[in-house]
Each structure stands twice: as structure tokens, then as C-alpha cells.
Amino acid sequence: MKKILFFVTVGILLTGCKNDTKNSAVTEGSPQTGEATAKKVAMAYGYENFDDVKQINFSFNVKINDTIRSSRTWNWYPQEERVELIENGERFSYDKDGEFDETETAADQKFINDTYWFLFPYQLVWSEYESDFNRMAVAPISQQEMQQLTVKYAGDGGYTPGDTYHLYLNEDNIIEEWTFESSEGRTLTTTWEDLETYNGITVAKSHKTEDGSFELFFDDIEVIK
């Protein structure tokens, strides 16, 4: 997967790192490390159910100061490695085989960005990164004490390498807030809220800044097995 992208019409948006899988076993009684916590977060969002998913449909929306700045719909077929984008009344599909032309690359950047927001907890298993765990930290929006998992994508892979995510977790390893730091020094802090589970896949449908001027949200969600 790839990393953070900044689309001109939207502002700060997320993508991910390279598509190498980091899949180390976490055994019962193992120390509370970043790697162990990362897998617990993925499992808390239903990661174990993803292999059975044939299709995921969702709409990605960004609202700034009560105005919708971006909206697009995805039909994702993970078992077929195929993606369909519907945007501005036009429909475009491509295969995620890693061999993209210019048009496919532009669509894939958007897809990686949008699915990073949509299923970031699964990237904690799918992607390679450096991690650190802090058992007690102050969350930036709520000012409450929570667990903190820091994930940094080092190296040269992805669309924009070198980005860092600070995840603030409750006792059930659910993300309550996060702060993104780009390799260029830009930051964005939002909530993770309005959780709903679709056929075993749990999604945070809304992400808001502290002042509410920015909201990224999902609707038209469907998970088909």
C-alpha cells in the first residue's frame, strides 16, 4: 500500500505504505509492544473476517465548513484485485496488478487514500512499518489518558514515504483519535467515531477535527461475502 496524499481540492488525506505484509505471530502473554498492539487493533476491527469478503462498496466524502469538497464511490473486489471508481458521473475500473498507466495511477492514489481512512486498522497487518507503544498518553482532542500506538512508514516505498501516525486507543484497542504527521511536517488530528459493523467488518464512519471544520465520512457502505 501507499502513504499520505494531499489532494488540492480536499486538503490532508491519507494513504499508506508499500504492499509488503508484516505478519508476525503474537502469543498469549507476550509483552505489550507496538507490534503486538497493532495486531490487536486490527482484530478489534474484524480483520479475521476480511478473507471471506468478495465485495466492498462505500462512498468517501470530505466536508469542510459545511461544504462537501470531495465525494466518490468505490466498488472493491479484493479477491479479484479489481477496483471500480465512480466520480463526477463517470465510472472507471482497473486491476490492482501493480502495472498502471497514468490514468490508473491517478485512480489508485485515490483508492489507497480512501481505503486507508476506511480500513486503516487492517494496514497494521498488511503493511511494513516501525512501531512504538506507550501505555499511557494524553489524547490531543479529548485530553483523556489512553494507550498510544505510533506507526512510522520508513524507507522509499509508496507514493509519499516517511509518514507517521499516532493512534490513541481505548482499553478495547479501538482507535478514538489519531494524529498524522507527513514527512514534510504537515499534521492532521481527527476523531474516530460512529463505529458500525458490516458483515464482520467494523468501520469508523466519521472523522472530525476538534473544531468540526473538517469532517471525513463514509456512507453507502456494503460488505458482501
Image (cartoon, helix red, strand yellow):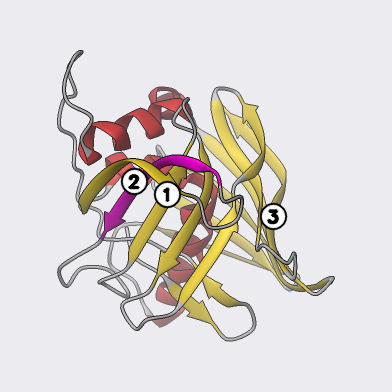
The image position of residue 139, as x and y in percent, is 50, 51
Which mark is drawn over residue 167? 1
Q: Does the magenta-highlighted stretch encompass residue 148? A: yes
Do the numbered discs 2 and 1 sit on residues whose CB atoms are within 8 Å? Answer: yes
Name the residue: 48% across, 41% down: 145
| The residue positioned farthest toward the bottom in the image shown | 8
In the image, the segment drawn in magenta is 144-152
Q: Give the Cα separation between the discs numbered 3 and 2.
A: 23 Å
The mark closer to the camera, 3 or 2, is 2
Quarter holding residue 200: top right
Name the residue: 53% across, 57% down: 140
User: Label 3 belongs to which residue?
Assistant: 217
Look at the image and tell me whether residue 109 can be seen.
yes
The image position of residue 10, as x and y in percent, is 63, 78
The image position of residue 12, as x and y in percent, is 53, 75
Of pointers 2 and 1, the one earlier in the residue sequence:
2
Type of the residue with mark 2: Leu
Q: Is residue 208 or residue 125 the one in the foreground?
A: 208
SS label for mark 1:
strand
Q: Give the Cα separation between the discs numbered 1 and 3.
A: 18 Å
Q: Does the magenta-highlighted stretch encompass residue 211? A: no
Type of the residue with mark 3: Phe
Quarter holding residue 102: bottom left
Q: Is residue 199 or residue 87 the one in the foreground?
A: 199
